[in-house]
Image: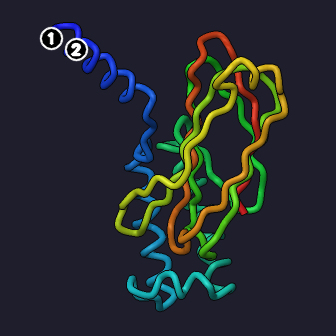
Amino acid sequence: MRLFTSFLFLFAFCASVSAQSCKSAPSVVSDLNRQISKILKTRGCAPSNFPTCLTNPTTYLHLTKEMVKYWNGRSSNWATIGPRRLDFGNYENGRIVSTGGRMYISCVPANKSTMTVDIKELDGKGKTSYVICKVDKDGRYTKLKTGWFNEVNSQKSNKRESRQHTLKGVKGHIISIHFDGKSAGNTFQYKVRVK
């Protein structure tokens, strides 16, 4: 019985260590959602029709410009060492060192129902997991996709792996991607894009 109990404890511990959460930056997401709501209301959008307002190109462009200004203005607070801004359509380059991590958060909600995430390995052998999430205007998180790079030895010898994920039902949601290094002493260099 003692051996069985020890096994269950070890299994639960290992499962909790490897599981990634979407909620790595809840205060940032809360700040973003509050500002998005404020900007959309000034454009005549009610909270109930925010997703519809996002399809208006003029409104979406205005929101994007204002949210980039807001993000840049916050750089003295959470944006300096915290998450990086995820701009739709552009590649973001990064490097995970050892057991470090990196989070990307879109500063505007998606204006399309379906988006594609491309992650391309550029260099390194560091074992790295990632989780892709969406967050609604009320701060509710949904894990959409998870994956690994360099999880097994055969992957470590291939320095040009890539992953592509289609995200559905994301219109009106903030998108976050969190990379988490799992290898002491190794690095993982990548580029990521959501479009």
Residue positioned 22% across, 8% down in the render: 3
In this view, the residue in front, 51 or 118, is: 118
Q: Which mark is residue 107?
A: none
Q: How is the image coloured?
A: rainbow
How packed is label 1: few (under 14 Cα within 10 Å), some, or many (20 or more)?
few
Relative to residue 8, is residue 43 depicted above or below? below
- Where the N terminus falls, by quadrant? top left
Task: Give the number of marks.
Answer: 2
Q: CA distance from mark 1 to mark 2?
A: 5 Å
Q: Quadrant of residue 194?
A: bottom right
Q: Quadrant of residue 113?
A: bottom right
Instruction: Indicate the amino acid at tag 2.
Output: Phe
* Rendering coords of residue 148 (x, y %): 62, 34
Residue named by callout 1? 1
Residue positioned 78% across, 35% down in the render: 121
* Rendering coords of residue 175 (x, y %): 55, 58
Q: Is residue 46 left or right of residue 190?
A: left
* Rendering coords of residue 27 (x, y %): 38, 49
- Where the C terminus falls, by quadrant? bottom right
Residue positioned 45% across, 37% down in the render: 20
Residue positioned 22% across, 14% down in the render: 4
In this view, the residue in front, 77 or 27, is: 27
Q: Is residue 21 left or right of residue 53?
A: left
Instruction: Indicate the amino acid at tag 1.
Output: Met
Residue named by callout 2? 4
* Rendering coords of residue 50 (x, y %): 47, 82
Relative to residue 102, is residue 72 depicted above or below? below
Q: Is residue 26 left or right of residue 178?
A: left
Whether tag 1 and tag 2 are in contact, CB under 8 A, the answer is yes
Relative to residue 47, is residue 80 depicted above or below? above
Label 2: element kind: helix
